[in-house]
Amino acid sequence: MMNKEITSAQLQQVYDLGCLFALQKLSLEEALEKLVGSLDMNQTSATNYMHNFEAFRAGKVYKRAMGALSYEIFLSRFYKDLSVSEFERVMESVELHLEYRWSKSKAKHLEIRTLVDSYKVKLASQVVSPIYPDEVHEQPTELIEGAIRQVTINAYERNPKARAACIEEYGATCQVCDFNSEAKYGDIGKGFIHVHHKVDIATIGESYQVDPINDLIPVCPNCHAMLHTEKPAMSIEKLKQIIDNDKVN
Ligand SMILES: [Zn+2]
Ligand SMILES: [Zn+2]
């Protein structure tokens, strides 16, 4: 352990200093001066904490152990302060550390492992805008896509502003089969929907401007996959017809 008697108020300050140090807004000397001077922490513990923060932000392994309380406080702060991808980097770093500890001493650190797993669950439930495996690589941030040479339908489907406008118009309910994720799964399903781009790529010119209401339509992941079984994608009407025919049979 680094410093058994450290309090959670002190760990909050360690976190603040650690982040400033990792972002190079504070030199190691300045950070240590504060930790050793005002928190009465020993030089070695303080140095180890700072190096751990560097590793957290870089997604790299760190070797010095920390107590469970440190993890509790740091992970909850990181989760609040960082973007999803930055937080994932922190988790990667903790995983690497746990592997390292395991290789050295066969220590499982169950308490820390449980904590890390609970954050994994939280992260998984945050995904509201899934990326289709066979879909793409570009994400235009503006509604007007003028002069884009390699346009892809999928980029339109993932354009966040256009998506939001489309969902606001139609609701997060599948416009083919009426599936609503929240109705089925409760809170965790709220707002979960794909957005399909109805306009054939061949008809799209160079300065095409996506119309979120006429060109886009919310569909559930299953219907979305079915629409894309044809190239160009089949029409909404055709898929509805297929579903209706199936009911009759
Ligand atoms: Zn559907
Ligand atoms: Zn689509």
Image (spheres, helix red, strand yellow):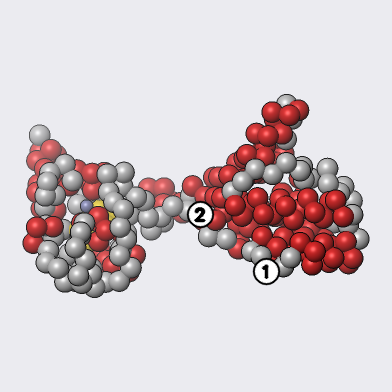
Along the line of sight, the residue nearer the viewer: 189 or 226 = 226
- Along the horizontal axis of the image, is 98 left or right of 181? right
Q: Quadrant of the C terminus?
A: top left
- Along the horizontal axis of the image, is 5 left or right of 155? right
Q: Marks 2 and 1: in contact by CB < 8 Å?
A: no
Q: Earlier in the sequence, mark 1 or mark 2?
A: 1
- The residue under the point 56% across, 50% down is 89
Helix, strand or loop for disc 2: helix
Q: Residue 25: give its label.
A: 1
Picture coordinates of residue 185, whole percent (x, y) = 41, 47
For mark 2, does the 10 Å Cα neighbourhood hold few (<14), some (14 to 19), or many (20 or more) residues?
Answer: few
Above or below for 78 versus 142: above
Q: Residue 85: give its label.
A: 2
- The residue under the point 64% across, 51% down is 56
Q: How many marks?
A: 2
Q: Residue 183: give its label.
A: none
The type of residue carrying mark 1 is Lys
**Does residue 86 appear in this view?**
yes
Picture coordinates of residue 117, whole percent (x, y) = 60, 41
